[in-house]
Amino acid sequence: MKRGIIVALFLLLVIAVIFFSQDRSSGPLQIGIIQIVEHPALDAARQGFIDALSEAGFEEGVHVVYQLQNAQGDMAVATTIARKFVDDKVDLVLAIATPTSQAMAQATEEIPILITAVTDPLEAGLVLSMEKPGTNVTGTTDMTPVRTQLELLKELSPKARRVGIIYNTGEINSVVQAQIAKEAAPGLGLEVVEAVASNSGEVMQSARSLVGRVDALYVPTCNTVVSALEAVVIVAEENNLPLIVGEENSVERGGLATTGINYYDLGFQTGKMAIEVIEGAEPSEMAIQSADKVETVVNLTAALNMGVEIPDSLLQRAHRILERE
């Protein structure tokens, strides 16, 4: 009897060795990364995701291979990339920003999709609910505290009455934030004046169209506008218009201030969720996660260039202060 048990255990061991050898011989994990445009916030989210996997032992080129693709703001290109990932039968996809997440979700219901930098996954049609997605999509939302950002604007520019918001109506994430701003504004003594930019080339013109009509500018986490943020900064500086932005990378690029999320941290958080999926978790059962924290960041050079005096109370509570150059 004992000999029979030993033989059976030996056979099981042999089978296990063969199984795991075959698993390794299948090659490294294939992960497709699709991004709507290049700009520092989205780039930071991508790097955070990759770093989370690397920290967990997924060495690039050995255990995982990334296919990095950028749609350059073109939805037709995003659709083509999504279809290619499906044809290539990648094991998992990281979709960065709302438009590319939508393109990817429309291309497959089978491949697990991790999203990040998506403002409202429910409104975007990516999930059935935030708590239990019910689809092959899960990940993180970058919903920013829009009302808090408008309150920050009032703190920096107490006399401001009209704020110009620049965004792309073709991005559902931007539409959602604009709507939140319009709902919050009256309670803060503000009126929202909208300027639309359908592509990065229109951002400068849209910003200039607000000159003389508003007392301050606000740029939410709109991929189109953020990709050309320097154009808005120029207009703000030329006309002494305080520019509040949706995230800290935009402060680093010349925005005056924000209370927002850190996109590298958000991407890292998404990477940890991806590891759970790789280990067998079902995206359909994994709740969409929000950023763990928000930070207030101010730019002293921008304040000087825009003619704004930053209150000591704000400087004391700021998490980061970018010093004058």
Image (cartoon, grey):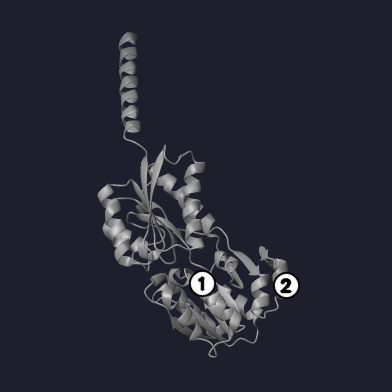
Graded by Cα atoms within 10 Å as few (under 14), some (14 to 19) or many (20 or more), the crowding at tag 2 reads few
x 28%, y 53%: residue:
84
The residue at the point 70 percent across, 78 percent down is 309
**Which amino acid, by three-letter code, is at mark 2?**
Ser
Q: Where residue 321 appears, x then y in whole percent?
A: 68, 65
**Real-space Cα separation, disc 1 to disc 2, in angstroms:** 27 Å
Task: Name the foreground residue: 203 vs 214.
Answer: 203
Residue ID for mark 2: 313
Q: Split into 4 quadrants, where in the image is the N terminus?
A: top left
Compared across the picture, whether 209 is left or right of 93 comes to: right
Q: Residue type at mark 1? A: Leu
Which residue lies under the disc numbered 1?
A: 229
Q: Secondary structure at mark 2?
A: helix
Q: Depth check: 229 or 122 in front?
A: 229
158 left or right of 162 in image: right
Front-most of residues 67 and 18? 67
Q: Residue furthest bottom?
A: 212
